Image (spheres, rainbow, N blue to C red):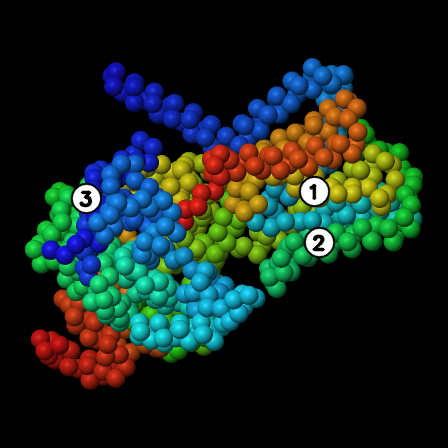
Amino acid sequence: MPDTLLEMKKICKNFGPVHVLKEIDFTLFPGEVHAILGSNGAGKSTLVKMISGAYQADSGEILIEGSPAKIESTQMAKDLGVTIVYQEFSLFNHLSVSENIFAGRFPLKSKVLKTIDYDEMHEQSKKLLQRVGVKINPKTLIENLPVGEQQIVEICKAISLEAKILILDEPTSALNAKETEKLFEIVRRLKESGVGIIYITHRLNELSEICDRISVFRDGKNVGTFNVGEKTISEMVDLMLGTNNKAHKKKSLSSKKPQKVLSLRNVHTKDISNISFDLCAGEILGITGQMGSGRTEIMKAIFGYETLHQGEIEIDGKIFTNPKQKTMIKHGVGFVTEDRKSEGILQGRSVKENIVISIMNQISNKIFLKTTLEEKYTNMAINQTGFFPNLPEKEIEYFSGGNQQKAILGRWLVLENLKVLLLDEPTRGIDVGAKGQIYDLMEGIVEKGIAVLIVSSDLEELVQITDRILILEKGQIVNEIENDNLSVNELTTAIMEGRNGTTSYRIEYEGNKQTI
Amino acid sequence: MEQQAIVLNTKETSKLFDFFKKNQNILGLTGVLILLIIVFSIIAPNFLTTSNFIDVFRQMSMIAIIAIGMTMVIITAEIDLSVGSLVAASSAVLGYLSIVMGLNIWVAIVLTIIMGGISGWTIGFLRNRYGIPSFITSLGWLSVWRGVAYLITGGFPIAPFPTSFSFIGSGFIGPIPFVVILMIALYILFYFILAKMPFGRYVYSVGSNIKAAQLSGVDVAKVKTAVFVITGMFAALAGVILSSRLMSGNPTVANGWELDVIAAVIIGGTSLAGGKGSVIGTFIGALFIAILTNGMVLMGVSSYMQLVVKGSIIVIAVIINAIQIYGIKGMQKDIS
């Protein structure tokens, strides 16, 4: 046994009367990737924040390299060699990539005048980005990067600090398959150099790829630490959720009705070109592809958030060449955006207000809101989505990410004439339990004859719930796959092949399933 | 049975608790206001009389009416600095239309209020069309309207208005001044608009998260324009009321009123960051300023000192608000 890099003994933390962590023991060795699993609220983030100096433990002991450490601030943590990449990015949107990487420790041209050596900074950033294997111009402003690339910048920033202990809080939740693989490469390399990595994730299939040991948290307790491979995924899920919760099972394909509710014909916007497809009532159509391939942009085009340069969109027989949000909502289209915080929730407003904002005409006569109707629809949304606890008057930010997502789904479910629901990464950053609930919910939706279009970079999710999958590359549809017991590996292959494999792949796929 | 009763009981108390929690800003402010009234009742002569209170309400009415519009503007995370100058310009224009041009006074009033609405509309239009911050456009109007007021009057009051016009500013209905009734009616109306009408929800949603609001089908441009138009019209209405009280069109009035209006809104607990606030808070905020001013006048505090006190009170109110949010230690170094 090598000496421990980090050792935590009997850590307790309370927030008021709530015991968030109960006597947690946790160890990390140099060159080890130690995963922490747990549903939302299990205490993972709290533990991690204690190591990074954001919180202090109420009782217990932290040892770093064998000697007791009192981490009272994030700066102290940094000095001790602890770096954290948060799930929610802490980047400066209006600064460039390299400025973000070197924030607070800019290379200086003159020590006296404190002028920044931009050339040096860009050069070093370029090297870092190359090491990660991405082509991002270090001079680009963060706000102009897609979310996935922002995540990579965040990781570059962390590795440039030469950390001894690196904490990755759901690093892959915004990444596609290729970017994830890149991240794993980086993680393996860091591992070899002796860095200890704490890895928080909701994606259980990632564990065997890079992790050495796994700790499962439930209700603020460490319910088990074991080596990778000792337990199956379903055993881990049981540990995480307790035994009476079962992870979601693959649904049987819904019986498709041939009635088309959404058609895109030859749609062009500034980001996508020549997009055509049909979506039938009761169907779940998945869209995937690399980050920046135009997945979100298709949804924005349908929802009237992007100008159509060419082409038309048909909703239930009505043709639109210049859709606007308001008209699309009127015709029964709902849109759950990728970025819950900046485009989804109304901060500071109650859950109820968040739900009914889309249906003001349904809950008011010409002049006044009708409280009874408002309550009826709020309850409907809460019951259908399993929003818990049932506190509609409370402000939305008091609830977990999964609950916030349910409220936003509820916002569209209450739409009387809902026909098409657009979901952009609907389960990003949501724990397994809530994920299953959202999948169940989607099944319920399509049974009512509503069509669902879902963009996701979680391939497991796509093969599990969709009927059909479109693969995008550079703003175009390059492949379409019927989901007939499709496996993640098959789908991954299809995405990797992209354009090159298009026609031949399709024939091969249909004719010769086993070999792929 | 017994268990049920207990459950019901806790539900009731938690409801009451929620009510206090939700309204702790307003309740706190009301508490301070009552304290202020008690203090002034003891030390300021003639403070605790009916006629003085009617006076306080009459004095606050114009600021308070504009503050209704300003509350909505600030809830949408915007600002309007032009209102003070717009009051003066409205007064001057009203005098010009009615006295110099000889228009019927009621026609002149309507035209003046339309002018206020147009002024507000430009702020909203430029905000929506070109993304020009309302701070800039309204700062421009602040200067322009003051200049216009001086230009058309030559710097002197225009008089006299027809005597029937004096009713608006100085008339009574029973024992209560007309302006006070007008003010209270507008507050009740806008309380319902904000709390019980779709438009109110839109106002809050735009201030809370403009993108989310837009993606939920809210016509955010229309909402922003509307709140500026309403504020402009209310500023013009205040100009009309003031002209009626002075019985002249007067370009020098309402200096710095934009600050009093904004102060009333902020003291009333509306957040400059948008998405939060209420007209009830604003009303109490305006009343607070009016009572403070009135009490100090009765006590014989010098007008210079009054400025110092008023300014300090605004900052203290905001500090108290911040303490309620962050606790006495203030914003922590943490990252959340």
Residue A202 sits in quarter: bottom left
Where does the image place residue A280, in percent across and percent down from the top left?
28, 65
Q: Is residue A264 visible?
A: no
The amino acid sitting under disc 1 is Leu
- B296 vs B122: above or below: above
Q: In the picture provided, is A318 more to the left or to the right than A184?
A: right
Badge 3 marks a residue whose secondary structure is strand
Q: Which of A275 and A292 is in front in this view?
A: A292
Badge 1 density bin: few <14, some 14–19, many ≥20, Cα 10 Å: some
| x then y, percent, for residue A273 | 39, 78
Residue B139 is tagged as 2
In three-dimensional space, the C-alpha distance between marks 2 and 3, rounded to whole angstroms, equals 60 Å
Viewer-side label of 2, 3: 3
Residue tagged 1: B259
Q: Which chain letter goes with mark 3? A: A
Q: Which mark is residue A98?
A: none
Task: Specify whether disc 3 shares its chain with disc 1.
Answer: no
Q: Which residue is drawn at 21% across and 49% down?
A: A66
Distance between the Cα atoms at labels 2 and 1?
12 Å
Of helix, strand and loop, which one carries label 2? Answer: helix
From the viewer's perspective, tell me whether residue A96 is left or right of residue B51: left
Q: Residue A25 carries which label?
A: 3
- Residue A9, by quadrant, is top left
Q: Are marks 2 and 1 in contact (CB under 8 Å)?
A: no
Q: Which residue is drawn at 92% across and 39% down?
A: B160
Residue type, numbered disc 3: Asp
State which quarter of the image contains the N terminus of chain A: bottom left
The three-letter code of the residue at mark 2 reads: Leu
Quarter of the view holding residue A176: bottom left
